[in-house]
Amino acid sequence: MDKIKIIMISDAHDMEGRLVEKGLQDLFSKDEVTLFNCADLKIEYCIGCFSCRYKTPGKCVHNDGMVDILPHLVASDVIVLLTRMEYGCYSPLIKRILDRTITFETPFLRTANGETHLEPRYPKKRKLLTVAYDENIDSEEAVIFTHLTKRNAINFDAEWRRPVFIREGEDIEKKLRRAYGDLLK
């Protein structure tokens, strides 16, 4: 079987996040993994100028860490987002990267699940796996985050996978192994 091309985008900057990040790296050891820890990268905020759509298709006006990330996103079979859960949402670092993936879309419209969305610029079916960690993730946050990740999968034109929630004291390896099995389906 060919190696799966995985891009892992992480915000891990504390002990808890680094443990989950290490667990993911171990889990994907037989695959081709490219890890970007956005805590180590300079990523500018999207300024909403839409140059990446109209003036320089697929290319942002910012020349920062996204220049390295985007080619790996385009080539990936699986996108893994590792984020600290913050009020049912991604961390600000991961959100900033997601905002910048607007270059993934063209200005042309399509219908997906009865809704209007932008056409993907790089049509390749990917899978999206999101891993959220925090000391206490309550059920309301989990519901909000699950809905959010489903919406992001539509924007990535990706197959959605149920997010993995890792709370303090839980068996990280067991939860990640189950998610990996789901990715292979």
Image (tube, grey):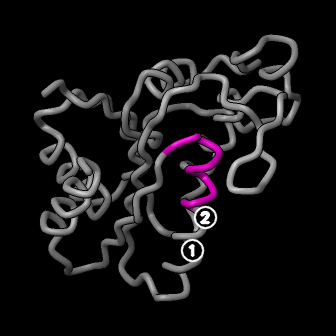
Could you say which is closer to the camera, residue 178 or residue 56?
178
Task: Give the residue type at disc 1.
Answer: Gly
Residue 59: percent from left, percent from top: 70, 16
Find disc 2 in the rendering and name its residue.
Answer: 148
Q: CA distance from mark 2 to mark 1?
A: 9 Å
Question: 105 or 7: nearer the eye?
Answer: 105
The amino acid beneath tag 2 is Leu
* Comparing labels 2 and 1, the label whose residue is closer to the camera: 2
**Residue denoted by label 1:** 88
| Drawn side of residue 121 relative to residue 13, left or right | right
**Residue found 46% across the figure and 87% down from its top:** 138
Indicate yes or no whether the magenta region holds residue 73.
Answer: no
- Coordinates of residue 107 in the picture (x, y in percent): 84, 28
Helix, strand or loop status at disc 2:
helix
Q: Is residue 40 left or right of residue 20?
A: right
Q: Look at the image and give the residue range highlighted in magenta.
A: 149-158
Asked if the residue under mark 1 is in contact with the one under mark 2, i.e. CB atoms within 8 Å, the reply is yes
Dominant secondary-structure state across the stretch colored magenta: helix
